[in-house]
Structure formats: C-alpha cells, structure tokens
Image: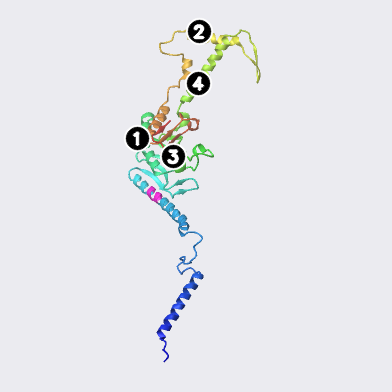
Amino acid sequence: MTPRSDPLLGLSTALSIAVMLGVFILRLVPLSPGPFGGETSATPPSEPPHEKSMPDSATASQADLTNFEIVHGREECMHLLQSISADVELLPPIKTDRCYVPAPVRLKSLGASSQVVFDPPVETNCRLMASLYRWNKTTLQPEARRRLGSQVSRIVGASAYACRNVYNLPTGNLSQHAFANAIDIGALELSNGRMLTVLKGWGPTARDIREAQKKLKAKAEMARTESDGSTKSPRTKTKYGELVVSLRVAKVSVSTKSSLAAKPQPSGTIPAKKDAILEPSRPTPTTLFLRSVFKGACGEFGTTLGPEANDVHRNHFHFDLNPTRSRPHCH
C-alpha cells in the first residue's frame, strides 16, 4: 500500500522556499527611499546624515543668539528709559557685513528741566544714551550754570554710529562708533544763543606749550651764536641760495634784551615777554567750562579723549563705553 502525502506538509515546504528566495532577491536589489524621505537603502549614503545637519544646526544657533541679543537689548532699553528722561525713537537692528547694533535708538534730547537737544539727532545704543544722560545732569548743566551763567540747550553736529575703523583707517580694529557705542561732540549752544566750540574754547594744549618752549630755546640759541661771532656781515651759503645775516643788528637786539633783563624783577617772576610765550594766557570762563565738563565725563565713560590726546581730537571730545578696558582711559 502506497503511503499518502500530507498536503499541509507540502504547502509549508513551498512557502519556506518562497520566503528564502524573496530574502535572497531583496539583498541583491536596493530598495527605493520610503514615503517619508528616510534612507532605507542597504548601501551606505555618500555623506553621513549628521554632517548634513550640522550647518543647519549652526545657522539656527546663530539666529537664536541674534534674536536673544535683540530681545535683551530692547529690554535693557525699556528698563533704562524708565529711570531717565529722554526723547528717543527705537530703531530696527543695524546689521552690515562688519557692524552690528542689536537695539539702536535715535536720540533727540535728554533731560527735562535741563533739557539738551541733539541737533541733528544721533544713533546710539541705550547704555551710551544713559551715560550721556548722567553726564548732562551731573556735569554739563551744573558747570554751564556755574561758569557761564546759562545752560546748554543744544549739542550741535555730534556724531555717533558710523560703521568704520579706528581713525577711519582702511585696516585695523573697528571703532566703537561701529557699535553705536561712541559719540563725538565738538560744539555746544547755550540758552542765550552763544555758541562754544572745543577747537576755539579749549585754549593751548600741553603740546602747544612744549612747542613754544622749543621755539624760544632755539631762538635764544641762535641769538647767542650770533652774539659770539664777528661784527661783520658774512654771507652764508645754503641750499636755498645766499642768506645774509646781519650780526650787528643781532647784537643790538641781544644787548637790548640784556638791558631789559638787567632791571630788577620781583622775586619769583620771569620777564613778561617770556611769560607770554611759555605760559598759556589766563584761562577764560569758556576754557574752564570745557575742561571741567571733559573731566566730569571721565567718570561716566570708558574712554574719554579730547584736545590733549592728539591733534585728531583737537576739535572735539570723544566719549565711548569700550568694554575691553579694565579702567577708564581719560586723556
């Protein structure tokens, strides 16, 4: 008797062979990407997924940081404006290839009873605005009333935000002006209409006095050399041609000076002519005012530069809140 085959056993065997064949085929043929864009291919991708996502993540972080600075800057402005009196206009963030100001303001005036108007308005950050407010309240207006009998009504032609390097050089560090963190002030107008400028009102600087001393010393040395020479009038060859020097005239001049110097002088004094050359004239009220308000600014700002610093600042004051200085720089 021939044994009968089990139909279930045959079906199970056929299914097992079909599954094994399908798995073998799937390993040979890569699958297409899934419907949600995921990588389902059995072959490794040409660029690791985490490397693709890094630029996007860094960009997002930078954007978050920028947004944080903007929000923080605006909140700081609102906080400062609660404690000071100022007429300002909030401006959108300033962003260029090199310069960035998260929360600038257009400053029109400061103070209430002692208001000073910026003509034209200037663009600053809020911390600089607050320092200017304190300087106006504690130094500028009190000194104007004390020394000039009036108060300052306008700051004329001031300059604040400017995307540039230090001293406008083509290379080098960015100026604090590039961050709206500095202001230049060169002219002030009083309530009585009088205009004051740093250039004309400051008076001789220490450099000017030293230069006058050097010229006086050179002139005295020349007179001494001429007095030791012959009474004749020699002709001296120079690269500019012939220069005729009259020693006789020089001797007369020297003898006249000697006779004046021989006169008795009060103890502790020097001749009036020498005093006029070496020493600055008696400071005017304007000079005293400008120097006192400059000195007062040294306590409010990180860097305070004026005519004594160099010739570049001979005609204006520079105030900034340089965050890199460990102590105020006042010169």
The residue tagged 3 is 182
Does the magenta stretch mainly form a helix, a strand or a loop?
helix
**Can residue 69 be seen here?**
yes
N-terminal-most mark, 4 or 2 = 4
Is residue 170 toward the left or the right of residue 318 in the image?
right
Residue that lies at the very extreme toward the bottom in this rendered image: 1
N-terminal-most mark, 3 or 1 = 1
- Label 3 and label 4: CA atoms lie apart by 33 Å
Label 3 environment density (alpha carbons within 10 Å; few <14, some 14–19, many ≥20): many
Q: Quadrant of residue 189?
A: top left
- Label 1 and label 4: CA atoms lie apart by 36 Å
The residue tagged 1 is 138
Q: Label 1, secondary structure: give it.
A: helix
- Residue 2: x %, y % from top left: 42, 90
Residue that lies at the very extreme toward the left in this rendered image: 83
Q: Which amino acid does label 3 sit on?
A: Ala
Query: Which residues lie in the magenta part?
Result: 68-73
Q: What residue type is labelled 1?
A: Thr
Q: Do the residues labelled 4 and 2 touch (CB within 8 Å)?
A: no
- Residue 272: x %, y % from top left: 46, 15
